[in-house]
Image (cartoon, rainbow, N blue to C red):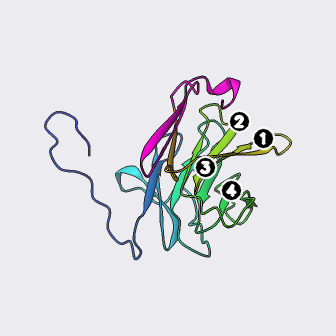
Amino acid sequence: WDLAPGVKEPQVFFGRDKDVVSLVFTPDGSALAFGGSGGVQFQLLHGAPAAFPPVKVGGDVRSIAFDPRRGALALVLAQRVVLIPDPRFPNNRVELSVDSSSFPRDVAFHPDGTMLVWAAERAVDFHRVGGPPVHHRVTVENPLDARSVAFSPDGEALAVAGDQGMFLWPRFRAGPE
């Protein structure tokens, strides 16, 4: 919604032929990226044409995140996480999931763009972006199946929420404890 004084109605986008499960603003705030069973589509705000070509994937898009610095796009699909370094070239992809049985659910970039984190069944996965790939998995004890992840704006804390609780790593840069 445009909540400027005197504006009471949201801008509505029509013409989507698939469900929308996740959406996020592009890093510059000029467009929305939204995903569901039809892959990922982009809509520039205020009715302009699409910012990037659609991203077709073999499955449902459950979560979307943009690298706030470099503009890379990360997607959670049914059993994998995919990184698209430049959304202008959606076929250039990197598969990041290391365990197809973990069922990733949500993904987030660290505010400085150096790390991608995703929530999965009984685990949180950490993947370094931009440099030699490093992957680390932290097992999450029951009753918390990780469902959502979020960094604080300064990147100093990581929150992970799940079925029956939440974990918070308040000094994230030192690494999860």
Residue 57 lies in quadrant: bottom right
Residue 87 lies in quadrant: bottom right
Residue at mark 1: 130
User: Which residue type does callout 4 highlight?
Assistant: Ile
Q: Whole-percent x and y of residue 89?
A: 69, 60
The Cα atoms of the two marked residues, 1 and 4, are separated by 12 Å
- Disc number at residue 84? 4
**Residue density around tag 4, few if under 14, some if 14–19, many if 20 or more, within 10 Å:** many
Q: Mark 3 or mark 2: which is in front?
A: 3
**Is 14 situated left or right of 4 in this image?**
right
Q: Whole-percent x and y of residue 147?
A: 49, 52
**Residue density around tag 2, few if under 14, some if 14–19, many if 20 or more, within 10 Å:** some
User: Which residue type does callout 3 highlight?
Assistant: Trp
User: Which residue type does callout 1 highlight?
Assistant: Gly
The residue shown at (71%, 36%) is 114
The Cα atoms of the two marked residues, 1 and 3, are separated by 17 Å
In this rendering, is residue 176 above or below 97? above
Residue at mark 2: 114
146 is within the stretch colored magenta: no
Among the two numbered marks 1 and 4 on one chain, the one whose residue lies closer to the N terminus: 4
